[in-house]
Image: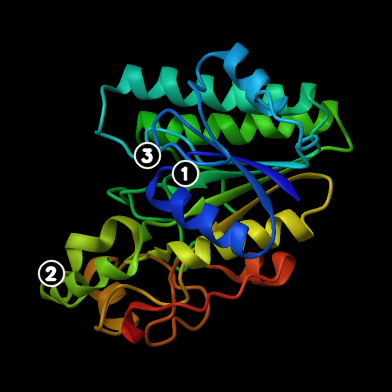
Amino acid sequence: MRIALTGSSGKLGTVVERELRAAGHDIVALDAVGRRRPGFVQVDLTDYGQVIDALGGAGDDRGPIDAVVHLAAIPAPGLRPDVTTFHNNITATFNVFWAAVRSGVRRIVYASSETVLGLPFDVPPPYIPVDEEYPARPESVYSLVKHLEEQLAIELVRWHPDLSITALRFSNVMVPQDYAEFPSFDADPRSRKWNLWGYIDARDGAQAIERALEAAPAGFDRFIIAAADTVMSRPNAELVAEVFPDVPVHGDLGEHDTLLSIGKARRLLGYAPRHSWRDA
């Protein structure tokens, strides 16, 4: 496919660009910052004119865009003032989605977030492992935007029945150089309770994106994307009993299995995480 990739200079985006290119895709890399290179276009995604021009080819003649992968955003709560996060992220996403639809693109995969599940779980989750079945519970302006983006996608596919939009609720993105810190988490399980001790290796994040590009049907759907295990050496039963003693447990927790359920992504997308900090 010829894929427009926003956020190509970010922590996840750099890995996604590398992996999609290695898989044979033609990538138009879009970001507000980034090194000058073939296929990269510097673009302000809050400016609709720039977005529609970039998706139209930005002056090259390699043909139309087949799909959009939208990762660009202020990537977490607390990095910028709330109003800045809201205005930037919702505007950029609307512009990308709208420009894609107007340009004839019918396949969009984008980064939603685990935060819509209720992070940082100061109010405990309804059950563990968490999944996509309970309503969104945004607890920050950043998370509120992610929820609104999912609602936007729902309406766009209703207006355009041939359109496919897939929201990937990525867990905390990690790369191999981050893994040296993981053993220190065991000392205080509450230090990582905010996302049920989850993470996602950026390489597996790229795999999930490629699976969604290949497999997602028309319409909208959302998927939790996490590693197959937790960040902890301590067993799940011990962690849950200590930190969330009153939360119902649905099924077998496993010793170190992710508590951010990836069953739906495995089943419908064929997602199969291959990377773990335990092997690093």
Q: Nearer the viewer, mark 1 or mark 3?
A: 3
Could you tell me the amino acid type at mark 3?
Pro
Seen from this angle, which residue lies furthest left? 187
Q: CA distance from mark 2 to mark 3?
A: 25 Å
145 sits left or right of 189 in the view: right
Please, is residue 27 above or below residue 152 in the view?
below
As helix, strand or loop, the secondary structure at mark 3 comes to: loop
Residue 89: x, y in percent?
46, 26
Residue 1: x, y in percent?
76, 51
Residue 57: x, y in percent?
70, 28
Please, is residue 68 above or below residue 50 in the view?
below
- Return the residue nearer the eye: 202 or 220: 202
Residue 82, quarter of the rendered image: top left
Q: Earlier in the sequence, mark 2 or mark 3?
A: 3
Could you tell me the amino acid type at mark 1?
Val
As helix, strand or loop, the secondary structure at mark 2 comes to: loop
Seen from this angle, which residue lies furthest right? 162
Categorize mark 2 by other alpha carbons within 10 Å: few (<14), some (14-19), many (20+): few
Where's the C terminus, which quadrant?
Answer: bottom left
- Return the residue nearer the eye: 167 or 23: 23
The residue indicated by pointer 2 is: 188
The residue indicated by pointer 3 is: 75
Number of disc labels: 3
Q: Which mark is residue 266?
A: none
Please, is residue 18 above or below residue 79 in the view?
below
Task: Write the residue at 40% across / 56% down.
Answer: 125
Task: Write the residue at 72% across / 28% down.
Answer: 100
Could you tell me the amino acid type at mark 2?
Asp
Categorize mark 1 by other alpha carbons within 10 Å: few (<14), some (14-19), many (20+): many
Q: CA distance from mark 1 to mark 3?
A: 14 Å
Q: Which mark is residue 116?
A: 1
